[in-house]
Image (cartoon, helix red, strand yellow):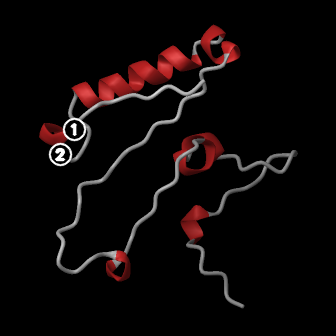
């Protein structure tokens, strides 16, 4: 079976078996996942909706103490305030807390 991975994506490994370029590749070291629905999953009579972004944050005591939570919140606020989303005029921010 032929490997369909492009040559540029390969990377040497360190002595523990980790990619040497893993911190320069956000798709490897960050927790994000994107679903792209093709036309099979779209209703033909309804126009395509704008994308929806959901942020799930760790609100544990450790997350608060090590600064992760405040850093994540500030990054999201910055993204919204600087129009990094495709339709900034339609961007709405809501929040829900679960305990």
Query: Which circle marks residue 7 in the picture?
Result: none
Whole-percent x, y for residue 88 in the image: 17, 39
Q: Is residue 79 above or below residue 25?
A: above
Q: Residue furthest top?
A: 65
- Residue drawn at x 73%, y 55% is 12
Whole-angstrom CA distance, mark 1 to mark 2, is 6 Å
Image quadrant where residue 91 sits = top left
- Where is the N terminus found, in terms of image quarters? bottom right
Residue drawn at x 72%, y 50% is: 19
Q: Position of residue 79 (x, y in %)?
A: 31, 30
Q: Which mark is residue 87?
A: 2
Image side of residue 11 versus residue 44, left or right: right
Position of 63 compared to 34: left or right? right
Q: Which residue is at the far left? A: 89
Most foreground residue, 62 or 25: 62
- Label 1 element class: loop
Image spot of residue 68 (x, y percent): 58, 19
Q: Which residue is mark 1?
A: 91
Q: State yes or no: discs 1 and 2 in contact (Cβ < 8 Å).
A: yes
Nearer-the-camera pick, 52 or 65:
52
Residue located 24% across and 35% down the image? 92
Q: Is residue 41 left or right of residue 84?
A: right
Closest to the observer: 98 or 55? 98
């Amino acid at each position: 079976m032929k490997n369909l991975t492009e040559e540029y994506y390969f990377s040497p490994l360190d002595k523990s078996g980790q990619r040497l370029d893993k911190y320069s590749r956000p798709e490897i070291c960050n927790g994000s996942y994107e679903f792209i629905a093709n036309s099979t999953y779209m209703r033909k009579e309804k126009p395509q909706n704008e994308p929806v972004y959901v942020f799930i944050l760790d609100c544990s005591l450790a997350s608060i103490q090590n600064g992760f939570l405040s850093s994540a919140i500030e990054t999201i606020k910055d993204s919204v305030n600087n129009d990094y989303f495709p339709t900034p005029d339609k961007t709405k921010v809501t929040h829900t807390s679960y305990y």
